[in-house]
Image (spheres, helix red, strand yellow):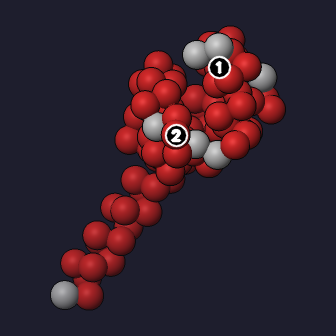
Amino acid sequence: MKARFLRFASVRSRAGRASTVGLFLTLFSPVAQAQQGTPEQRRACTPDVYRFCAGEIPNVRAITACLRRNRSGLSEACRAVFDQRGS
């Protein structure tokens, strides 16, 4: 039983690391940066991406659509990013 739990825990840990790496690559890759806005805008929305759109990582378009769908629940800072862009 303990071995089964440890295997499950390591799978979840690897999945968590993969998600984090995917988000990192999405937020900081040069190609993605051209599509995503300034570092300040990305920093403002990163917590909301984790909260609402973690399943969409690393698809930038899907993350943006997800944030728009959840606009009413976004943090003030992230909502301001979308207000600036006029979306």
Tell me: residue 4, above or below residue 84.
below
Q: Nearer the viewer, residue 44 or 28?
A: 44
Q: Position of residue 62 (x, y in %)?
A: 42, 25
Q: Position of residue 13 (x, y in %)?
A: 43, 63
Which label number is shown at residue 72? 2
Q: Position of residue 1 (x, y in %)?
A: 19, 87
Image position of 27 (left or right of 63) = right
Secondary structure, mark 2, is helix
Tell me: residue 41, above or below residue 55.
above
Q: Give the distance between the C-alpha atoms of the residues marked 2 and 1, in whole angstroms.
A: 20 Å
- Total residue callouts: 2
Secondary structure, mark 1, is helix
Residue drawn at point x = 70 percent, y = 27 percent: 81
Residue extending farthest left: 1
Q: Nearer the viewer, residue 17 or 79?
A: 79
Crowd band around label 2 with a 10 angstrom C-alpha radius: few (<14), some (14–19), many (20+): few
Residue drawn at point x = 64 percent, y = 24 percent: 82
Residue topped by disc 1: 36
* Identity, as a three-letter code, of the amino acid under mark 2: Ser
Image position of 83 (left or right of 67) = right
**Residue 27 falls in image quadrant:** top right
**Residue 44 falls in image quadrant:** top right
Taking the image as drawn, is residue 27 in sight? yes
* Identity, as a three-letter code, of the amino acid under mark 1: Gln
